[in-house]
Amino acid sequence: MVKDCSTDTVAQAVREYEGVTRKKEIGDMIRSLRIESPDVVASFGEDAAVIRHNAEDALLLAADGIWSKLMEADPFWAGYCAVLVNVHDIAAMGGRPVAMVDILSVTNDRLRDEVTRGMVAASAQFGVPIVGGHLHPNTPYSVVDVAILGTATMDQIIFSDTAEEGDVVVAAIDLDGRVHPSCCFNWDSVTMKPAETVRAQIRVMEDLGKEHLVTAGKDISNPGVIGTLGMLLEVSGKGAVIDLEAIPRPDLSAIDLPFEQWVRMYPGMGFILTVKPENVEEVRRRFADVGITAAAIGEVNGSRRLSVRYLGRETQVFDLDQEGIMRFFTEGGACR
Amino acid sequence: MVKDCSTDTVAQAVREYEGVTRKKEIGDMIRSLRIESPDVVASFGEDAAVIRHNAEDALLLAADGIWSKLMEADPFWAGYCAVLVNVHDIAAMGGRPVAMVDILSVTNDRLRDEVTRGMVAASAQFGVPIVGGHLHPNTPYSVVDVAILGTATMDQIIFSDTAEEGDVVVAAIDLDGRVHPSCCFNWDSVTMKPAETVRAQIRVMEDLGKEHLVTAGKDISNPGVIGTLGMLLEVSGKGAVIDLEAIPRPDLSAIDLPFEQWVRMYPGMGFILTVKPENVEEVRRRFADVGITAAAIGEVNGSRRLSVRYLGRETQVFDLDQEGIMRFFTEGGACR
C-alpha cells in the first residue's frame, strides 16, 4: 500500500480527523428538536428524513452546508459541493433528488456570484433545479447551505440503521478523479464528467433500493470511508472488521497521496453499503457499469466495534459502545 | 387614525423601510439560478416553490431565515420566528406544512440552546416536526435558517401572480396580540395562543385554496401589509388603490403605536389576498371564525401602481413599472 502504513496509524488518523470529531458536538440539541409525528419514518441519524406521503410514497428532506474556510478558498467549489452533498444525501437513501432551495450568507458580491456559479453548474449537471432560497447579504462571514427534497416509494428506501450480522461491507467509490486543488481532503471525480455519467451514478443507488440489493447504506461524507462506516454501524448497533488493503483506491504512489489521507477524503461519488453475500457480485457489477469501483472490504459482526486489518495485524478504530461518533446528526461536505 | 398621519408620510415610510429596500439587492443572482425543469410549476417570486408530483399532487418547498440582529437580541424569538415564517410560506400557498429542516450558525452554546428552544416551541405549537438539519458550530456570527416541505393538490394552490383587475384587496390580520418586546416591528399574536387556535388559522388558507375563494395571496412578511401587497401586484402585473383607514389595526392609541409603524410590522398571522367581490363576505367570515380580522381595503386595477388613499388624498407608494420591489425573490422574517 504505502511503506509506512499500519493499522495503528490509519486507526489513529481516522479517530482524530476533524471530519470525525466535529460530529460529536451536537448531541443534546438534536434530541431536544424531536417532536412526535406519525408520518415521520426517519429523521436525525439518516442522510435524509423520510416522511410517509399517501399510502406508498415517501418524501425525503435533508439539509447540508459548506462553511467559511472552503467558501473563502474556492467559492465556486463550495457552491458546487453544497449541491453535491445534498444530491448524495438523497441518493444514499435510494431516492430521487427533485429540487433544492439555497440559503446564502456572503461577505461580498464577488463571493455571492462565484458560489452561485458553482451551485448552478452542479444543479444543471445533476438535473436538480434550485427553486428558491434566502439571502443574507453582507454578513461578516460566508456560508452556503442547501436543503433538498427527494421522492421514493416506501419500499425502496435504503436506511443506515439496518445493517445485519454477516452482511458484507461494500465500499463504492469513483476512482477516476483528482485531489481537488482547493481542498486536499476532497476527491473530485465529478466536475470533469458529463451530466449523463454522474446522473447514472446517482441512479444506481435508486435501483439498488428498488431491487433490495443492499441492507443499509450511507454516502461517504466528511468522516471518510472508515468514519462513515463507523456512523452506519453506530446507528445499526453493529460492529465490523475491514481490510485496509481492500478499500478501493487510485494509484496513490503516482499522485503521492498517503493512504491515511485517502481514507479520510470526501469522494465526489462514494457510498458505504452492507450487502447480503449472495448479492455482492451484482452490486459490484451495477457500480462498475457506471464507472464506480465497488469492493467487499469486510464483514458486519455483532461486536459494536469497528476494527481495521492489514498485514495480519488488527487495530480497533471505534468502540461504539463507549464513544458515539455522531449521536444522531447528519453533517457533511465541509472542508478542513 | 393618528393625528399626524397622512398618505404622504405613510407612502414614504413604507418605501424607505429596510424590510422593503432589502428586497432589491437580489436580482441577477436569482435569474442565474434558474434551470429549466418541466415539473417546477413555480419557483422564485412565490412564497414557496411548487413542484408537480404524480398527476394531481404538488410538493411545496421554501426556505427562510432570521439573521444576526434578532438572534442576538432574542434568540428564543428568532428560533420561533424562523419556524413561523416558514409555516406562513406554505400556508400562503394554500398548502399544508409537513416537515422542516434547520440550519444553524451560532457563536456560542447558550445561543444555540435558546434558538433551539424557540424552534421547538413553534414546531410543537404548529404541529410541524423538525426532521433534520445542519449545524455550523462556533461561527463568528449567528443565523438560523429553516427550509420547509409542504403538500397540496395542484388545484388548491394560491399563487401570488394571479390577481386580476376588479378583484378586491383583502388584508387579514390577527389583531389580538402585542408588539414583541424584543422587536418593535414584530406583532406577536401567536406565542400566547393555544396550538388549536394557530393551527386553525393556518388551515383557513388551505380551505380558501381548496374552495377557490381567492384569486391570489401572500403572507404579510417583512415589508408589512402595503409592501407585501406591492410584491403581489408586481408579480401579477397589476396595480391597486387602497384605503389606509380600512387596514385592520388594533387600538393604536391605546398602545401608543404610530400608524406608519403598524403598516410596516410583520404580523404573527397575516395575509394579503385578492378576492372576487362576490366572495369577500365568505372570506371575511372564514377568517373571523378563527379570530382573524379580514377587511376589504381596496381594489386591483391595471395601472401597475400602488397608491394609498386617506381623507380624500391619494399618494403613490410604488410605480411597479419603474422600480421592482423584489425582482423575484422571496425573503422575510428578519428584524430591523
Image: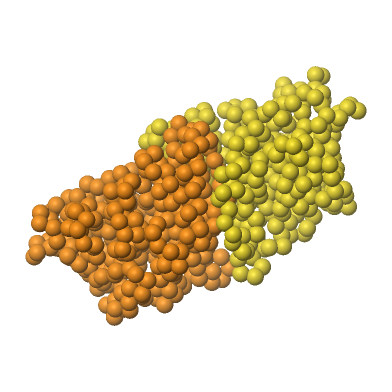
Chain colours: A yellow, B orange
Q: Is residue A301 above or below residue B179?
A: above
Residue A172 in the image: state x and y as whole percent: 75, 42
x 83%, y 36%: residue? A242
Question: Which residue occupies the foreground of this view, A190 or A109?
Answer: A109
Question: Which residue occupies the foreground of this view, A4 or B45?
Answer: A4
x 72%, y 30%: residue? A14
Q: Quadrant of the C terminus of chain B?
A: top left
x 54%, y 41%: residue? B135
Q: Residue furthest right?
A: A312
- Quadrant of the rendered structure where residue A177 is? top right
Q: Is residue A230 visible?
A: yes
Is residue A48 left or right of A102 when viewed as pictured? right
Residue B313 in the image: state x and y as whole percent: 9, 62
Q: Quadrant of the N terminus of chain B?
A: bottom left
- Quadrant of the rendered structure where residue A60 is? bottom right
Residue A203 in the image: state x and y as whole percent: 68, 53
Is residue A43 left or right of A172 when viewed as pictured? left
| Figure label count | 0
Residue B77 in the image: state x and y as whole percent: 40, 48
Is residue B171 left or right of A34 when viewed as pictured? left
Q: Is residue A296 visible?
A: no
Q: Residue furthest top?
A: A4
x 40%, y 32%: residue? A140
